[in-house]
Amino acid sequence: MDTLSAKDRNLLDAAEAARPKAYAPYSFFHVGAAVRTRKGDVYAGCNVENISYPVGICAERNAIAAAVLAEGSKMEIAAIAVAAYGKDGQSVGITPCGACRQAIMEFGQQARVIFTGNKGELRIESIDKLLPDSFTFQSLT
Ligand code: THU
């Protein structure tokens, strides 16, 4: 079990506060995410689904979009927290999906990811542990 610093608690609180704003009428899985940038500001997002299911977008990538909008393309993620409610409205464990891991990596190769594991345990992991051998700019050259 990891322990949360005050800053990390604050970030998880922001993710939890975004969670009820989710638009999830298809999965009933409500997700909130919050990015803390290297500048120190916090940006939140929630998942937004669509009747054409693949069009929906995850909370993490919406939080990243808000951070880019505010800070521009040089925005760097220091940490990102994620929280979810299941169908019954109770907190459930969530780890960022593969697409979101790649999106986090793009803006923070050292980003710390704060989430709740499947047994309800708090986890803090570096993104390169969650997404080893990721596709990077170097891969293109
Ligand atoms: N979802 C997220 O917002 N973040 C994740 O990391 C995993 C899944 C959303 C997508 C969809 O709206 C719902 O949760 C069920 O997959």
Image (cartoon, grey):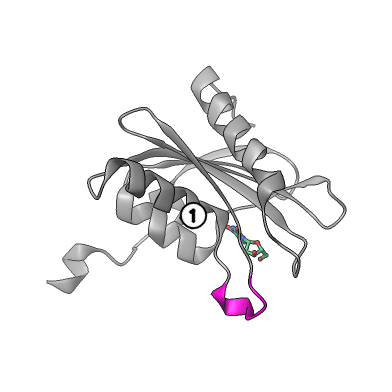
Question: What SS does tag 1 mark?
Answer: helix
**Residue extending furthest top?**
6
**Residue extending furthest left?**
141
Q: Residue at x 62, y 30 (%)?
A: 13
Return the residue nearer the eye: 78 or 58. Answer: 58
Q: Is residue 100 above or below residue 80?
A: below
Q: Residue at x 34, y 63 (%)?
A: 134
Return the residue nearer the eye: 133 or 107. Answer: 107
Return the residue nearer the eye: 23 or 83. Answer: 23
Does the magenta run of residues contain 24? no
Q: Residue at x 56, y 45 (%)?
A: 33
Q: How crowded is mark 1: few (under 14 residues within 10 Å), some or many (20 or more)?
A: many
User: In the image, 129: left or right of 45?
Assistant: left
Q: Residue tagged by mark 1?
A: 62
Does the magenta run of residues contain 53? yes
Q: Position of residue 7 (x, y in %)?
A: 50, 22
Which quarter of the rendered image does ligand 1 occupy? Answer: bottom right
**Which span is picked out in magenta?**
50-55
